[in-house]
């Protein structure tokens, strides 16, 4: 039997390897009938019920909208570099930190009088002579106080007599004026308290005195037994190999225990019966006023490879009581790159490290100020390490260094020098 050409074409079209739909409606209906998406099947099955079709259409597109909304959240979190915080609590043996203890007495009367005037207070030459030499000592520590006297400034008040103005005590401010070498630029350091002004003026001259003593060796006292009566770690006695000594110009003789010169102490148990135990003795009557206004000891706990910044991170313990100090170690590791601008070892920080220790933010900030001090003022601040080739500030050699220092200090606190932005946090 002969077939019609159209029938043969239809059979060949139905038996083709790849079938093509004649319209998008057939394609969509085929997809809805064969897909596993529940909403798409309901769209086709309920096409005779317009309310049902509309409901499933809204639900179908709402589901797709929620899915792409979740995709957006995941993508946003992916490009925002999220940080995961993991806390690990371990009870293993830890390296005991370094502990620095200072006397809070920079220079004693007895040693100062003996070094300057040859007077020995232990011989008992009389309180009258001691008071006389004590006054001479105070005058020698402030040799230029009369040359640069403190000045009082009062606010002008209308209607007051010029010869005997009655000014309220609260309206007075006390301070001093420092000028450059040409006396054309002057700054005023004003204080609401006369005690603060005198102490600041006293400290300014004290720095000049220290700059004339090579390394502070002339008045250095390292008599360990006169300050520390007993030292024990984990119920075992300490010896000279367990501590090192240095002299601080403000806090006096300082002793650092477990500084890493010998085998490091290890600690595994907390409590007052474990760790470091010290019994110290202080001499309040032998203090020089304004150099030290408190008695007791200054304590700081730090790592072995970090300098002891006693003024910023230390704390005082008062005499006559037992003080217990409990410490907890926390380690922070920061991710570099796109997560933060931390530094590994400070080699990529544009500040030269002046401390013989590892990089810390405080080490960098102090080094930045000292470098700026040498560059701007031509001398170095006595309380910070001395850069190579520089000399400490002394008004017998650098007449206007005080004027330069206080201006630089104001720029430092307001971050005009950029030290706080240059010195980045360490990655660990």
Image (cartoon, grey):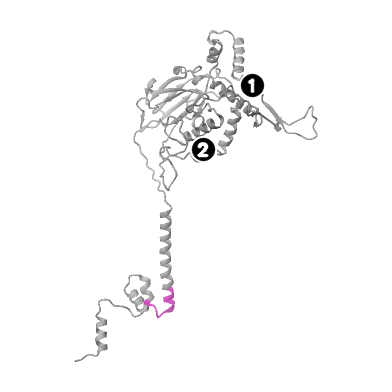
Q: Contact, CB < 8 Å: mark 1 with mark 2?
A: no
Give the magenta range: 44-55
Can residue 213 be seen in this snapshot? yes
First reached walking from the N terminus: tag 1 or tag 2? 1
Q: Residue furthest left?
A: 1
Q: Is residue 350 left or right of residue 233?
A: right
Q: Residue at x 39, y 28 (%)?
A: 275
Callout 1 crowding tier (Cα within 10 Å): few <14, some 14–19, many ≥20: some
Image position of 139 with respect to 313: above or below = above
Q: Residue 391, image x and y in percent?
A: 52, 25
What is the count of numbered marks?
Answer: 2
Q: Please give the residue where the numbered disc 2 appears in the rendered image.
A: 419
Residue at disc 1, secondary structure: loop
Per the image, is 337 magenta?
no
Rendered-image quadrant of the C terminus: top left
Of the numbered discs in the image, which one, if any, rests on residue 145?
A: 1
Callout 2 crowding tier (Cα within 10 Å): few <14, some 14–19, many ≥20: many
Q: Is residue 370 left or right of residue 234?
A: right
Q: Residue furthest bottom?
A: 1
User: In the figure, residue 236 lies in which quadrant?
Assistant: top left
User: In the figure, residue 131 lies in which quadrant?
Assistant: top right
């Amino acid at each position: 039997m002969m077939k019609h050409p159209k029938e043969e074409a239809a059979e060949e079209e139905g038996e083709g390897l790849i079938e093509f739909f004649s319209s998008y409606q057939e394609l969509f209906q085929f997809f809805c009938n064969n897909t596993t998406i529940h909403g798409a099947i309901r769209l086709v099955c309920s096409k005779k019920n317009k309310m049902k079709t509309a409901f499933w259409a809204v639900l179908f597109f709402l589901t797709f909208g929620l899915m792409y909304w979740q995709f957006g959240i995941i993508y946003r979190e992916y490009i925002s570099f999220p940080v995961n915080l993991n806390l690990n609590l371990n009870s293993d043996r830890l390296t005991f930190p370094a502990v620095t203890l200072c006397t809070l007495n920079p220079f004693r009367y007895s040693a100062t009088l003996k070094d300057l005037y040859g007077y020995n207070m232990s011989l008992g030459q009389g309180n009258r002579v001691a008071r006389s030499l004590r006054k001479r000592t105070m005058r020698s520590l402030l040799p230029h106080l009369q040359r640069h006297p403190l000045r009082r400034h009062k606010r002008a008040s209308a209607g007051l007599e010029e010869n005997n103005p009655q000014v309220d005590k609260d309206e007075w401010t006390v301070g001093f004026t420092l000028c450059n070498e040409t006396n054309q630029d002057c700054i005023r350091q004003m204080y609401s308290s006369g005690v603060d002004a005198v102490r600041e003026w006293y400290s300014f001259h004290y720095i000049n005195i220290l700059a004339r003593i090579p390394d502070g060796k002339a008045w250095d006292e390292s008599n360990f037994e006169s300050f520390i009566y007993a030292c024990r770690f984990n119920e075992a006695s300490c010896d000279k190999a367990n501590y090192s000594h240095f002299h601080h110009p403000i806090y006096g003789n300082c002793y650092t225990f477990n500084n890493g010169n010998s085998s490091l102490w290890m600690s595994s148990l907390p409590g007052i019966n474990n760790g470091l135990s010290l019994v110290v003795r202080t001499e309040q009557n032998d203090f020089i006023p304004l150099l030290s206004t408190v008695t007791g000891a200054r304590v700081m706990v730090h790592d072995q490879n970090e300098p002891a910044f006693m003024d910023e991170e230390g704390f005082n313990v008062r005499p006559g009581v037992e003080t217990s100090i409990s410490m907890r170690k926390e380690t922070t590791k920061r991710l570099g790159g796109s997560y933060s601008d931390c530094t590994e070892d400070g080699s990529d920080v544009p500040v030269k490290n002046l401390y013989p220790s590892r990089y810390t933010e405080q080490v960098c900030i102090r080094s930045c100020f000292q470098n700026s001090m040498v560059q701007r003022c031509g001398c170095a601040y006595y309380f910070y390490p001395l850069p190579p080739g520089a000399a400490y500030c002394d008004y017998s050699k650098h007449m206007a260094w005080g004027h330069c220092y206080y201006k630089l200090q104001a720029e430092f606190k307001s971050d005009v020098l950029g030290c706080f932005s240059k010195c980045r946090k360490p990655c660990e």
